[in-house]
Image (cartoon, rainbow, N blue to C red):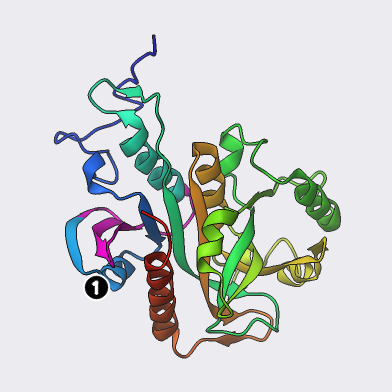
Amino acid sequence: MKASLSSSELILNADGSIYHLNLLPEDIADIIITVGDPERVSEVSKHFDSVEIKKGKREFITHTGIYSNKRITVISTGIGTDNIDIVFNELDALINIDFASRKVKTEKKQLSFIRIGTSGSIQPDIPVDSFLMSSSAIGFDNLLHFYEHGHVTNHAVESALISYLGWENHNIHPYVVDFDESLAEIFESNRIRYGVTITNSGFYGPQGRTLRLAPSIQDFNDKLARFSYQNARITNLEMETAGIYGLAKLLGHRAVSLNAILANRATGEFSEQGHKTVEELIKYTLNAIANSDLI
C-alpha cells in the first residue's frame, strides 16, 4: 500500500491549495503557457475569449481561460530554474497527487508546457526580434543534478561540450535535454527557427556580462558560439529552458520553449521594439495552439 505524503513534503494551504502557487486541481488546464514576468500573464490572457481563474501568490500569477475553444492556463514562473523547480513540481502535484489521501495517483495525466520567453542570441546571423524554438537546452545550473535524471539527458552532447571547454575537472557539469518533438510540430513555420539554448544560472557573470566584476571564464560566449555537435550549434542564452525540459521529461509531460530574441550578444544590439516582438510571439503561439489538436 502506498504511503501518504507527509504535510512537510506535500504542503497545502488552509483552503486546500498547493503551497506556493495557491492553486486547486480544478484551476489549471492541460495546456500551460509559462512566462517569466508576472505582468506578461495578462498580456497573454487579454487575448482569451474568457477568463475563469485569476490567482496569484508572490511572483506566481495564474490565469486560466478559453481561447478559440481551447482551455489554457498561463502562469508566471519568475526568473531562473530555482522557480521552475517549484512551479513544475506543484503543477504536476495538482493533477497527479490526490490531495485528500495525499497519495500519488496510479493513473497519471500529461500536461503540455509552452514557454514564451525572451532570450539573447550569441550568433551574429540570428537577428533581434526573430523567433527561436529550442530544440535542446544545455543547463549550466544545478537543478537536474538533484534528481535521478540520466535517462532523460543527452550524454553524448554533454561529453563533447565538457571536452571542448576543458571542463573535465570543472565544478560546472552541464546537462542537455531535448524538446518534445510532437509538441514542437505545432509551432513549426517559416517564422520560427530552431536552435540549441544555454540556460544560465544568472544574468551577468554567468552570461559573460561585465559591469564591475571580472568573469572567471574569459570569452565564454565566444567559446560557446564556436561549439557544434553533429552540425548543431549553440544559438542563444536564457535562464529557464533546461529546467523546464528536464523536469517535464522526468515527470512525464511535454515541453517546448519559444524565444523572442531581444538581444544579439555577438553584435551588441538590443531590440528597439521588444514589447511588440513579445506580443507577436504571444499571438503566434496562441494561433498555433488554436489550430492544433491539443485539448
Corner quadrant of residue 66 = bottom left
- In magenta segment, residue 81: yes
Residue 246: horizontal and vertical position, in percent?
56, 45
> Quadrant of the rendered structure where residue 74 is?
bottom left
- Residue 295 versus residue 226 in the image, above or below: above
Give the left or right position of residue 262, taking residue 27 as reference. Answer: right
In the picture as drawn, the residue positioned furthest to the top comes out as: 1
Task: Pick the quarter of the image with the N terminus.
Answer: top left
- Would you say residue 61 sits in the magenta stretch? yes
Q: Residue furthest left?
A: 15
* Secondary element at image label 1: loop
Residue annotated with mark 1: 46
Q: Position of residue 64 (x, y in %)?
A: 25, 57
Mark 1 residue type: Lys
Q: Nearer the viewer, residue 268 or 127?
A: 127
Q: Which residues are magenta?
A: 55-82
**Residue 6, how many percent across, how many down?**
32, 20
Q: Nearer the viewer, residue 214 or 145?
A: 145
Is residue 109 positioned above or below 189 on the image?
Answer: above
Q: Residue at x 55, y 43 (%)?
A: 249
Magenta segment's dominant SS is strand
Q: Is residue 123 left or right of residue 167?
A: left
Q: Is residue 292 visible?
A: yes
Dot 1, crowdedness within 10 Å: few (<14), some or many (≥20)? some
Query: How many tags in the picture?
Result: 1
Name the residue at 58% across, 72% down.
132
Residue at 56% in and 70% down:
188
**Along the horizontal axis of the image, is 294 left or right of 7?**
right
Left or right placement of residue 234 versus residue 243 in this view = right
Image coordinates of residue 143 in percent, x first then y, are 55, 43
In this view of the protein, can residue 24 be seen by the observer?
no
